[in-house]
Image (cartoon, helix red, strand yellow):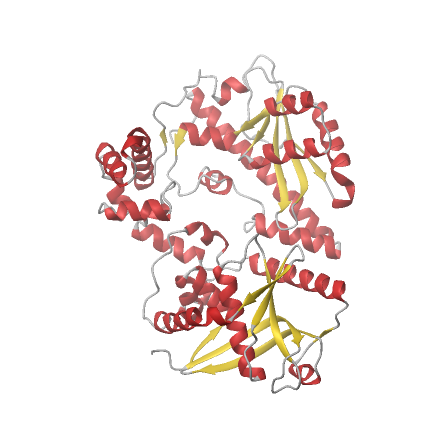
Amino acid sequence: MKGDGLVISDRLLRSWLRCPRKAWQDLHGDPTQRAWHPQRAIQLGQEQQCLSRYGACRGLTMARGAAEAFRGAAAIQGLRLLAQQERLQLRGRVPLLLRHDAESRLGPWSYVPLLVRTGCFINREQRLCLAFLGRLLRSFQGRRPPHGLMLSTGGDCQQVSLDPLQPQLDELLAEMAVGLNQPHAPDLIAERKRCTICCWRQPCNAHAAASGHLVDVSGVGAGRRRQLIRLQISTIAELAQSDSAWLGQALAQQGHLSQADHHNALAAALVLQARSQQSQRAQRRPGSADCSGQTSLTAQLHHAPGVLFYDIEADPDARENYLHGFLIQARQDPGAPLDLTPDPTGVTPQHHPILCLPHHGDGRCWQRIHHFLSRFPGWPLLHYGETERIELQRLARRAGASAASREDLDRRFVDVHNLVRQQWVLPLSSYGLKSVATWLGFRWRHPNAEGARAVLWWRHWRRHGHCHDLRRILDYNQDDCQATRFVAAWLLAQESGAGPRA
């Protein structure tokens, strides 16, 4: 086995299971290309909160340090362990060790490891990480724990048997020892949605663009990429040069011939998307409604006295929608088309944030939002993506709003993202708000602002009460509303024929 002196930590193991390229770059990548991402800080904060709740519920005193293990402490937090396995050095940090009534070199007791998990189910990554910590613990206490514990963020604790996982762990460590000693980084993973929270996303995005990686085509996932590679299509350029009729027939032969129309439409969309990205030019989608169609943005805003741009800030782990932000844009001239373009003097529409703290309750939050919306009857609610419509309707139902109120609310929603996808093919790998608005020239005030960072600001504000954290969140929400307005203004300009050629 290769890998003399190779150190494999629990973090490196997680990285490899998620993306071998990330693990390789963690060891060999240029540190100047590494960009900090708040996801790790969010996870550590969440882990600490879960462990604190768990200890408080069971009356545990959280000890620290290896000496406490020899004294038989009931719970030891954050212990760092080392082990040697053949030519590999293993190390890791165990979030929590719990005393177990089984003799070890420590005394008439031993310990079992506990990990905090997110998600509804225990996945392979979590099981193998728990087995890895169990192996470190065997080296420390002289016996491998028979099981580990997996603590959910909701407080449920499940046992995971570690013995059946040992062959998988051996195979994984051998694979890592070989892969991490290769001179070149492994290929990009097919599921590149994970890359959005990776610290190496910038160099990987550059590599994907330079190599014409297929998964950078919007609409191509891991399964679709495998299909295309079987058809000798392995790059964006090759997909762009493909005949859509031939591709539709080939995809139908790989799938269900009875769904030929579906495959033909899919092939046409993929080829068109690849050609747009290859040429770096936007194209109107064939068959989309023109500026006179009822689904156009122009038609939906034709009689509106004004519009409200709407964006939610949420903490998904806590399932909190803590900020509902609105940007108020009134029609200046009743006889003229609604103008959404930025004011040349720099004056921006009024931003109206509604902060919803958990102790406010659904009823009070809905009452405040409903009172605000009632000031603007008939004004469309422009949002980007389906989250805002789903969450506001859900809040209205939980608060006991009448069916008539919910129906009236539903008629006001206009999904700008959906209109972009229906009408346009853009030279972008993602049609998210950040991607589209940035391509159009919009810039956020905080260059590194993103949803995960806003969550971190929110949690810091809740814990420490620093006003600058809340100010950043409000700025970020206002910029998201402004970005939605920016994209909507571009759509209106294209529909009127007055906008610049895309």
Taking the spot 40% from the left edge, 43% from the top edge, the residue there is: 429
Identity of the residue drawn at 58% across and 47% down: 451
The picture places residue 276, in percent across and down from the top left corner, at: 33, 37
- Image height of 141 relative to 347, above or below: below
Where residue 363 sits: x, y (%)? 76, 34
Q: Is residue 233 left or right of residue 485?
A: left
Occupied quadrant, residue 176: bottom left
Residue 346 visible in image: no
**Position of residue 9 measured from the top left corner of the image (x, y, whole percent):** 49, 73
Which quadrant is home to the N terminus?
Answer: bottom left
State the image quarter where residue 407 is shown: top right
Residue lying furthest top: 335
x, y percentage for residue 37?
54, 57
Identify whether 44 is placed above or below 253: below
Residue 123 visible? The answer is: yes
309 relative to 43, above or below: above
